Amino acid sequence: MTSERDEQFGKFVLDRRAELVRTARLITGGDHHLAEDLVQTTLTKLYVKWPAYRRAGNPGGYVYRIMVNALTDERRRPWWRRERSTAALPDIAQAESGLDREGVDELMTALKRLPPRMRATLVFRYFHGLDVAETAGALGCSEGSVKTQTARGLQRLREALEVTPGRLSYLPGNIHP
Amino acid sequence: MNTDLHDRFTDIAGPAPAPSAATLTADLERGHSALRRHRLAQVGGAGLLAAVLAAVLVVPGVRTGGVSTNIAGPPAATGTAADEMTSRSPARLVAYTGAQPHGFTVDEVPEGWEVQGSDESAFMLAPKGIADQDPASFVGKIGITLEKRVPDVTTKKVTVNDKPALLATMAGNDRPGTVFIAQPSGAYLVIQVWKTLNWGEQELVRFAGGVHVGKDARPMVG
């Protein structure tokens, strides 16, 4: 079956899926398997809500909100890791960026320990470069909440990483963006 | 944006390949299944009415026992008028001569209806020329799916082609519009009729008796 919805959604998947996978890896704290599950869930929900997505004033934020809500929902479900519907997982090779592997692993561990919405706040702010208002739109919360989540998230990363001297220089100094 | 933190996030995120054709297909199939479940839930779900409707219909033009049965549900010229037209104009249940849906076969359809779309888990019947050409849209149509289980609904036991079946009146309906027919595989053939067709148990069971699950059909997943 093909329809206008299928055509539009298919184009969206081709254009945006890779970016969603990378975002999902970050907001799941580096869990590539859960990230793929999360992207599948996000896209499935998006397909159902496609007319609303097309009408959304900020469609990019609309998709991110679905993803964050799906992450929260998934974590409430006891079977969330059991249902897999793809035969093969995507390539999960790490980028060769020249950054120190140990430091990145430590950051990933620290990131994973943050609550999902706090993690998502940092990802939207410092990976996607969204400003406070855009992040609030993506999360469906107030700008004040974004500022609070950002400050607390950075602080908790500092606390988690400060046991290793020299690991903190890349964190923003001003915790109130 | 803090460049250093961005770089480290970039490293954690890693590279992501462009989606393959198989991935795209799988994403679409999950979307189709979810949309069907969503629409099923809109007419089903919790708080359902008991299945109490008798087999006596009050639909004008209904005949039973003849070669063909007049039932509500004619072709509709426009989507906006589909509901009204299907509820007031009789249509005969006639032998289906068009291309069979994928994974299923259907013996009879309302006169002037066609298979609007199908996949291995479902197919949709609709009046020819209906404005709503989305095969995943159920309004004013007949939807047939193969499901792994029966939802938590109040049902009445009936028999369709000597197979045990359950008749359900879904939320927002005042008569049965859905029948679940047990299959040898353990799955259920689910036939759901839009309420404005005004079908009762007799029409629903008769129509259901003409729908068959083929070897290529697969229960909905996702």
Image (tube, rainbow, N blue to C red):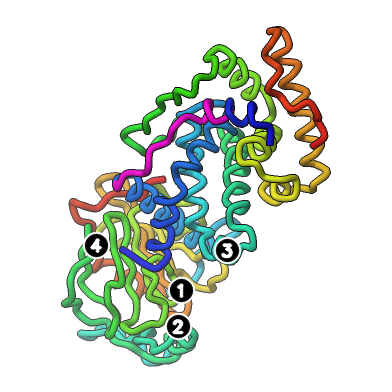
Q: Determine whether label 1 and label 4 are within 8 Å by CB.
A: no
Q: Do the residues under discs 1 and 3 have CB atoms within 8 angstroms? A: no
Measured Cα–Cα span from mark 2 to mark 3: 20 Å
Q: Please provide percent x and percent y for residue B39.
A: 49, 62
Give the x, y percent position of residue A101.
52, 15
Q: CA distance from mark 2 to mark 1?
A: 9 Å
> Disc 1 marks which amino acid?
Val
Front position among marks 4 and 2: 2
Callout 2: helix, strand or loop?
A: loop
Q: Amino acid at mark 4?
A: Asn
Residue with the mark numbered 3: A52
In the rendered structure, which segment of residues is drawn in magenta? Answer: B9-21
**Mark toward the viewer: 1 or 3:** 3
Numbered mark located on residue B139 in the image: 1
Q: Which residue is nearer to you in this view: B166 or A1?
A: A1
Q: Residues within 10 Å of mark 2 (few under 14, many from 20)?
A: some
